[in-house]
Amino acid sequence: MEKELPALSLINQQLMDVYTFFIALIVLLIGVFRVYSTSDILHTGLGHQVSFGLFIFWCTRLVFQFWVYTPNLWKRKLLESAIHIVFSLLWAYFSIVFFIICSME
């Protein structure tokens, strides 16, 4: 990344920084929300709707992991393969948990 980013124009470098920051911020806030609003998520209609949205989010991220990113980025590379497997399992876990929550009555 240190090689690619300087090749971009200044506006594109700054866009990448800003988008990365806000994506990380929203994922962090979702995690905080899950920790501090567990009861609301589990026992309210709004919580189930939010869980459905998070199911779609994480399920889509899992699909992208296999059908958008080329396997050439991680195949035959020990560290990258391990990271690919760990995060694929994590996103599958998130997808399953949020599906279970949004399916609760």
Image (cartoon, grey):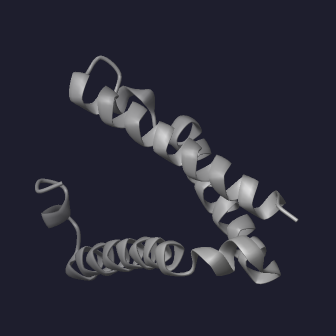
Q: Is residue 97 left or right of residue 14?
A: right
Residue 63: % across, % down? 61, 43
Residue at screen point 13% across, 65% down: 6
Asked if one can make out residue 66 in the rendered structure from this viewpoint, the answer is yes
Q: Can you name the residue that lies furthest to the top here?
A: 76
Residue at screen point 41% across, 73% down: 23
Q: Is residue 34 above or below residue 77?
A: below
- Along the viewing direction, whichever of 15 and 64 lies nearer the viewer: 64
Q: Can you name the residue that lies furthest to the right here?
A: 105
- Along the viewing direction, whichever of 17 and 41 lies nearer the viewer: 41
Residue 87: % across, % down? 42, 42
Q: Quadrant of the N terminus?
A: bottom left
Residue at screen point 77% across, 82% down: 46
Residue 58: % across, % down? 59, 55
Q: Is residue 103 above or below residue 25?
A: above
Q: Quadrant of residue 68?
A: top right
Asked if one can make out residue 59 in the rendered structure from this viewpoint, the answer is no
**Image mark count:** 0
Residue 88: % across, % down? 48, 38
Residue at screen point 69% across, 59% down: 56
Q: Quadrant of the C terminus?
A: bottom right
Q: Is residue 1 left or right of residue 61?
A: left
